[in-house]
Structures are given as structure tokens and as C-alpha cells.
Amino acid sequence: MIKKTVLITGINGFLGSHIAKQLSGEFDIIGLEKNNDSLFRLHGQNFKVYSSENENLEKVFSENKIFALIHAATIYRRESDPLENLIETNIKLPVRLLELSNKFNVSLFINTDSYFNRPNSNYAYLSDYTLSKKHALEWLREIKGKCLVINMKLFHVFGPDDSPGKFVPFIIAALKNDQTTIDLSPGEQKKDFIFVKDVVNAYKVIIDHADKFEEGISEYEVGMGTSVTIKYFVSMVKEIANSTTKLQFGALPYRENEIMDAYAANSKLLLLGWKPKYSLIEGLIQTIK
């Protein structure tokens, strides 16, 4: 049986690499990265990876019969970074990819979105990132064609091989190394933490139901459907890591416009047959190991 081909953008990223590895048994995986000089998360894998920096994007589609495209590439902008890079990756790239998907008869386009991109969200330090995700989605809605578009709104994804500067990897590293103290906010804000393997399974369910979606954009929220406080989460990591670090909750203020409770309305995913397989503790144990 010939495997269907799935194109994953940002294939060397945290999420993209997990999607590629988990789906590779059932699908023929190809990837797209800005450049493919250092594919460190794909070590030992044999995926064909194109460079959006060095090659014509149309070539990716003309050389492969792509069934589904998973757009996982994204960037968060630091203050010193030019806005052009954010706009190029988070807005112009998905728009161009959807146009090509329609031209080359790709059946399914899965866009990766964030729970920060919500009407009432005004998270100051991610304002330009959330604006770019909002504009990208608006443009994807404007593009008419036969390719079905699914918007996956991810909640707080964690797992092995994430970028060390992000909250969960930073906390895990500090606790495993028995850092003397960690200054934290009061920690009463609640988040929907979901293990990355469960997120990949959600993408798999969407692909498996590609023939059942209506035209236009359908949206699915991807999370456990429950939230826990940061204080509970960090304390659990400390316990699993058997750390001596002192957690100083309240040493830092909340961020400006802090989201105090966010959890996924995941009923639509559950109706498709998806359900999380990993508890918070199970996901943390795998991540910490």
C-alpha cells in the first residue's frame, strides 16, 4: 500500500519534529525549514527536507503528491528582531502555502494556532505574535479553494526536546540542577498543560477524518479540557525531579494582562474519537527523564 505524503513545515521545531516522528510509520513525511543546515531534532531520521530560503516553494509541491500539509512553523519575536521575519513566517508563508495547496490539489491544510489568539486576550509580551496569528487566520479564511483548512488552537504543549528558553523546559532544568531558588509569580494563574504526544494524536485524528469536513475553515481546540495552577504544576515537577530548589512564589508580579484561567473546549475533538492518553504526571515523567 502506497503511503500518503504529509508535508510538515517547521519540521525541525519542537512540535514539527514530534509530528514527523510519530506519523512516519503511517505516512511518507517530507519537511520544510527556512534552512536545513542544522536539523538537530531529526538526528537519525531520513526525511526529505526542503529549504524555503534556498528553493522555490512551488518545487516542493510539483515534486511530491502531497495529501496533507501541517503548518507548524512559527516564530516568536524578540524586541531586537525585525518585524519582517515575523510577518514572513507567520503570515506570508501560510498564505503562500495554502495558495499552492489549492493549485496542486492538496486535500487538507492544517494550520497551527495558539490559545493566545483569542478575542479577549491582550497578553502584552506576545502582542505582535498573537497579532500575526490572527492576521494569518483571517487571510486563510479569505483564500477560496478546494483544499480543506483546519485551524488547531493549541493550549500549553510540553514534552521532550522543547526550546530551553520556554517556561516548562526552564523550570525542569532549574529543578533538576537543584538551583538554589526560583523566583516566581504567586502562581494562581491556571493553564491547560497537554503532553506533546497527545497533541500529535489530535493531528492524526484530523488527517484520518479528512473526508468528513465541510468546506471552509473548521477550528479545534487542543488541550486536556482542564486547567491547573502554575503553583501546582511547578510543585509537581519539583516532586518528580526530587529537587532541593526553593520555590519563591510571589517574588515576581504577574505579567501585564495575565490570563488567569485558560482551558480547551475540546468537545469537537472528543467527538472525532480523540482523547488524551497521558496524564499530566505521565507526561512530566517522560519529559523530565
Image (cartoon, helix red, strand yellow):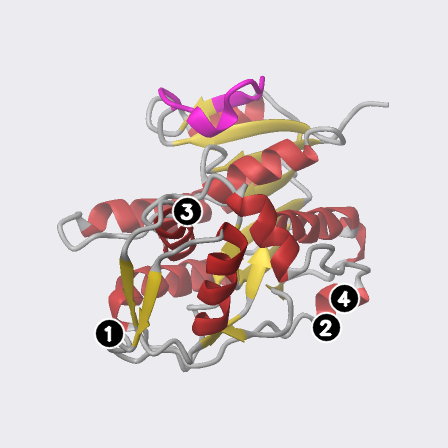
Which of the numbered marks, if any, corresponds to residue 263? none
Residue depicted at 44% across the width and 72% down the height: 231
Local packing at callout 4 (Cα closer than 10 Å; few below 14, some 14-19, many 20+) is some
Residue type, label 4: Leu
As rendered, which of 182 and 163 lies closer to the eye?
Answer: 182
Q: Which residue is mark 1?
A: 251
- Quarter that holds the C terminus: top right
Which of the numbered marks, if any, corresponds to residue 267? 2
Residue 110 x, y percent position in the rendering: 59, 50
Residue 223 is a magenta residue: no
Residue depicted at 66% across the width and 46% down the height: 108
Q: Is residue 133 left or right of residue 250?
A: right
Q: Secondary structure at mark 1?
A: loop
Q: Which residues are magenta?
A: 36-49
Residue type, label 3: Lys
Residue depicted at 39% across the width and 52% down the height: 175
Image marks 2 and 4: residues in contact by CB distance under 8 Å? yes
Q: CA distance from mark 2 to mark 3?
A: 36 Å
Q: Which residue is mark 3?
A: 176
Q: Residue furthest left?
A: 80
Instruction: Name the quadrant containing residue 224.
Output: bottom right
Q: Which residue is mark 4?
A: 270
Residue depicted at 49% across the width and 53% down the height: 242
N-term mark: 2 or 3: 3
Residue 212 x, y percent position in the rendering: 80, 57
Residue 128 x, y percent position in the rendering: 27, 62
Q: Is residue 184 left or right of residue 65?
A: left
